[in-house]
Amino acid sequence: MWNKIVDELKKTNKEGIINAFIKPLFAISESRDEIVVGCPSEQIVNILHKNGWIEKIQKLAIHLFDDTTKVKFEIKSNESDDDLQSELPFMKEYEKEEKLAEKRTLSREYTFDNFVSGPSNQTVYAASQGIAKNPGINYNPFFVYGDSGLGKTHIIQAIGNYAIDSKGKTVYYTSSKRLITDYVAALSSNSISKFRSDMLKHDVLLVDDVQFLSKRHGTQEEFFFIFNSFYEAGKQIVLTSDRYISEIKDIDDRLRSRFIMGVTLDIKPPEFETRLAIVYKKSELYKMDIDEETAKFIAMSLKNNVREIEGALKTLQISSELMGINKVYKSFAEDILKDMLKKTGSMGISEIIKITATYLNVKKSDITSNKRSKQISLSRQIAMYLAKKYTSKTLKEIGNKFNGRNHATVISSISKIEKIMTEDMNIKKIVDRLEREIEESL
């Protein structure tokens, strides 16, 4: 009975939607009176209910079977199928990266063209391009470190993809976890020679998350040999870690010294402009139409890493397809992402006014007043500029916080500050300093 309902749903819905939300569901019991459907996650049930799918399923059951047939949903895992998805896509980003590493293949999505460069990562980005164009010549080895979700896997695989596509190089990509597993398996099967040759025949060696080599002294010894073989042959080595080399405990000093003999750079959390550019770039890749207010809302709300932004956008993409929505607006994003964002904060206009007033040594009440002295007017205009840049509020909402000024006044103030910053470096330095303070507070 449940299979008949699924077949009907497949006729009118995209395969991606069926795979994401219908495939995880399964029949627990079936009768003409009641069909009990199991679902491995309350999250999926909630989004189906919110988007009207529970009602659609109920109507299909009545249409196909009997006017009295009811459909009941229970949260329960399907023990007969380990592959069923129990959570929405953004909850599985880390596992997806691990599976990618296990296969030692490069994702075609991870290219330099798809990487959004900004102040937080531009040095790493530029160095990576130089390495990809001339592997083994400069920056060897190349060690990239930074917190999880900032783009290390993207950048290391972008190097690999470019080296293959543009330089005709062969690339060996793995994670340190997989390296450990392969080494242990080779020991067990007495095939260390093959283990080595499988790696050494390549032109470029990419190893993700080398911090997991900690305490794995046998693997460290073997990797020391492999590292030296690549380096002495003039072959490129690229490594990533979630921490600086000196902070990785229980690593052999000889190996540690090899890691630092080349170039070491870090990736920092993206600042607002970069996060906003990432939102637009990923929305384009996911073929999702998103308005400016929504893009700013997401960029302001998700500050920790790129993976959070990708997950939010994938969730919005699937949810908008479920509801037949062609363009994503802020109200929709707030509703769909409220659970994901409930622990995140954002800078309010009042806080921006406070920061501006403190730094420029004026009263908060003066900034929102009708006083027109040069110092107060400039402070007010700067605060409006920052409010537009660092909040997702509309021009009208911003004006209301400044004693009910209209949107035309807000636009004029923003334009004046933008123009002044190109002419007066002292004002630009003031605004830059305030921006840094706001960024640190986010």
Image: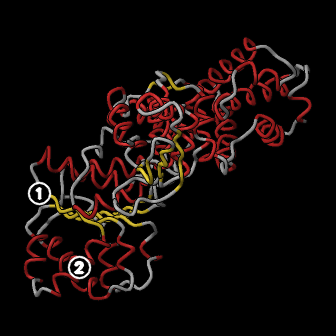
Q: On screen, 259 above or below 132?
A: below
Q: Secondary structure at mark 2?
A: helix
The residue that label 2 is drawn on is 223
- Provide residue 427's location: percent of width, then percent of height: 69, 32
Q: Is residue 426 left or right of residue 189?
A: right
Instruction: Tell me where residue 352 appears, x and y as whole percent.
Output: 76, 37
Q: Residue furthest top?
A: 408
What amino acid is found at the position of numbered circle 2 in the picture? Phe
The residue under the point 59% across, 25% down is: 422
Question: In this rendering, would 252 be left or right of 63?
Answer: left
| The quadrant where residue 251 appears | bottom left
Q: CA distance from mark 1 to mark 2?
A: 19 Å
Q: Vertically, is 57 above or below 208?
A: above
From the viewer's side, name the closer residue of 190 and 34: 34
Disc 1 residue crowd, few under 14, some 14–19, many 20+, Cα 10 Å = some
Q: State the count of labels.
A: 2
Q: Secondary structure at mark 1?
A: loop
Q: Nearer the viewer, residue 10 or 159?
A: 10
Q: Going 51% across and 30% down the picture, which residue do you hit?
A: 67
Q: Which quadrant holds residue 80?
A: bottom left
| Residue visible at 68% across and 21% down in the picture | 414
Looking at numbered disc 1 in the image, what kind of residue is underneath it? Answer: Thr
The image shows residue 152 at horizontal and vertical percentages of 38, 56
Number of the label disc, if any, that sits on residue 193? none
Dot 1 or dot 2: first in sequence order is 1
Label 1 sits on residue: 170
- The quarter of the picture where residue 265 lies is bottom left
State how the image is colored: secondary structure
Tell me: residue 6, above or below residue 102. Answer: above
